Image (tube, helix red, strand yellow):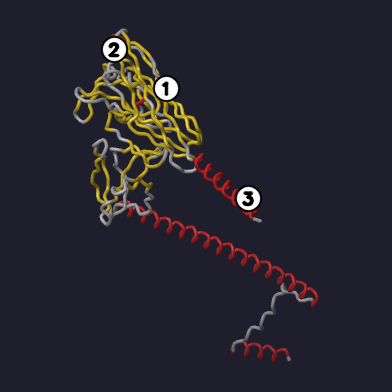
């Protein structure tokens, strides 16, 4: 019996150890390793980052730093750049994420691309322990003339925007193209120029370079061949809103007053309407990712956007009077139609009554004719003339004549 108890106890301990081992083995870990390429000044070089995990990864993020005097970032899959800092993302249920980044070598020497922060989550929602590596890039002598200018080359077309002179830039990298746009061409001032066009509409943007400062995209107004400032806000995952400068004719509810709103990131100002009852809410007008113009409600506290259904559009007096007149004319027109129908119906009814009366009279006359024929009544015989009364003189003369005869 004691041996049996010991055996059962050993089995329980073994099961617990197995459970602990499974839990330990489930705790995912990963390594973020890089390639160490060699290149020359002026040449382009690729650096590969490989994220390898022991368990499927739901998401991973890493922030990298590099020396801008040695390398210039050109492009990368799942990579965004911000003034010497790179952000890479990946995941979606895989256990291996590979990211390729392309740089141009600017100066001889050795430079390092290092990881400043990294984190990840596995498909069960548990955090991943990441071991970070680094990339060492050896840059040898080369051809400095191949080094591209940091600013894109400007063209010769000059345009004015709000009194400021700009030059149209056509040699720009794909990294600056806004979401939802692609390269296209624009015929302007007798030439064909490279711009970007929204994939869901004919809206175009031109990349303009001021005399001082950085180049930026501006909205092209096809109606009058002018440009206006452009800004784009994310309203949801994969959804965006392009703010409009032209809000003429836009109707909003009476409890909103016209004002302006300044975008926190770009500092650009656009027309808007503020709620008088809830000052934290604004209405903004623009073009969404479907290419449709509409109103959005902007919550300044949460920084969120929501499509606004305007069910109480304001109307001026002329519009209201016009609508009332149209309604009145419509009702009068309906009454006129009804009156015509009634008159026609009455005429038809009278005509039917006259036809019935005429038929009945005809039948009665036929019946009377038959009756007169049956009893021998001749309506055409003239009435006997009444005897003419004699005067006194005529009567005396007649009697004298009778006496003579006797």
Task: Provide the residue designation for mark 1.
Answer: 48
Residue nearest the viewer, comparing 328 with 217: 217
Measured in 3D between alpha carbons, the distance from the residue under mark 1 to the one under mark 3, in whole angstroms, is: 54 Å
- First-in-chain label (3 vs 2): 3
- First-in-chain label (1 vs 3): 3
Toward the front, the furthest residue is 2
In this rendering, the label closer to the viewer, 3 or 2? 3
In this rendering, the label closer to the viewer, 1 or 3? 3
Crowd band around label 3 with a 10 angstrom C-alpha radius: few (<14), some (14–19), many (20+): few
Which mark identifies residue 385?
Answer: none
Measured in 3D between alpha carbons, the distance from the residue under mark 3 to the one under mark 2, in whole angstroms, is: 70 Å
Asked if marks 3 and 2 touch (Cβ < 8 Å), the reply is no
Residue nearest the viewer, comparing 336 with 14: 14
Q: Quadrant of residue 246?
A: top left
- The local secondary structure at tag 2 comes to loop
Q: Vertically, is 174 above or below 309?
A: above
- The local secondary structure at tag 3 comes to helix
Q: Position of residue 360 (x, y in %)?
A: 68, 70
Task: Provide the residue designation for mark 2.
Answer: 108
Task: Provide the residue designation for mark 3.
Answer: 7
Asked if marks 1 and 3 touch (Cβ < 8 Å), the reply is no
Q: Position of residue 78 (x, y in %)?
A: 41, 29
Q: Vertically, is 128 above or below 360?
A: above
Q: Quadrant of residue 210?
A: top left
- First-in-chain label (2 vs 1): 1
């Amino acid at each position: 019996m004691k041996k049996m108890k010991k055996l059962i106890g050993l089995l329980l301990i073994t099961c617990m150890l197995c459970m602990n081992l499974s839990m330990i083995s489930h705790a995912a870990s990963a390594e973020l390793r890089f390639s160490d390429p060699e290149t020359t000044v002026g040449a382009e070089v690729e650096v590969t980052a490989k994220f390898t995990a022991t368990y499927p990864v739901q998401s991973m993020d890493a922030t990298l730093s590099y020396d801008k005097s040695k390398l210039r970032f050109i492009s990368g899959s799942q990579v965004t750049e911000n003034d010497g800092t790179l952000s890479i993302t990946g995941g979606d249920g895989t256990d291996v994420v590979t990211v390729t980044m392309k740089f141009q070598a600017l100066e001889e020497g050795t430079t390092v691309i290092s990881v400043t922060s990294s984190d990840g989550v596995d498909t069960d929602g548990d955090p991943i322990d990441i071991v970070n590596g680094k990339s060492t890039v050896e840059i040898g002598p080369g051809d400095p003339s191949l080094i591209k200018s940091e600013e894109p080359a400007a063209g010769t077309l000059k345009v004015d925007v709000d009194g400021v002179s700009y030059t149209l830039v056509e040699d720009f990298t794909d990294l600056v193209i806004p979401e939802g746009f692609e390269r296209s061409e624009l015929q302007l001032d007798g030439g064909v120029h490279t711009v970007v066009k929204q994939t869901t509409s004919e809206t175009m943007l031109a990349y303009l370079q001021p005399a001082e400062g950085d180049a930026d995209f501006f909205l092209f107004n096809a109606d009058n061949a002018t440009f206006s400032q452009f800004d784009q806000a994310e309203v949801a995952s994969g959804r965006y809103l392009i703010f409009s400068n032209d809000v003429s004719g836009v109707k909003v509810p009476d409890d909103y007053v016209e004002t302006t709103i300044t975008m926190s990131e770009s500092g650009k100002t656009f027309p808007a309407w503020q709620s008088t009852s809830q000052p934290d809410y604004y209405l903004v007008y623009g073009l969404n990712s479907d290419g449709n113009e509409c109103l959005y409600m902007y919550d300044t506290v949460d920084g969120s956007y929501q499509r606004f259904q305007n069910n109480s559009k304001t109307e001026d007096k002329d519009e209201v009077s016009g609508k009332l007149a149209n309604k009145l004319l419509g009702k009068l027109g309906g009454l006129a139609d009804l009156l015509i129908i009634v008159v026609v119906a009455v005429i038809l009814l009278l005509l039917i009554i006259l036809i019935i009366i005429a038929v009945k009279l005809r039948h009665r006359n036929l019946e009377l004719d038959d009756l007169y024929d049956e009893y021998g009544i001749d309506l055409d015989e003239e009435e006997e003339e009444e005897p003419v009364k004699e005067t006194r003189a005529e009567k005396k003369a007649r009697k004298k004549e009778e006496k003579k005869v006797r």
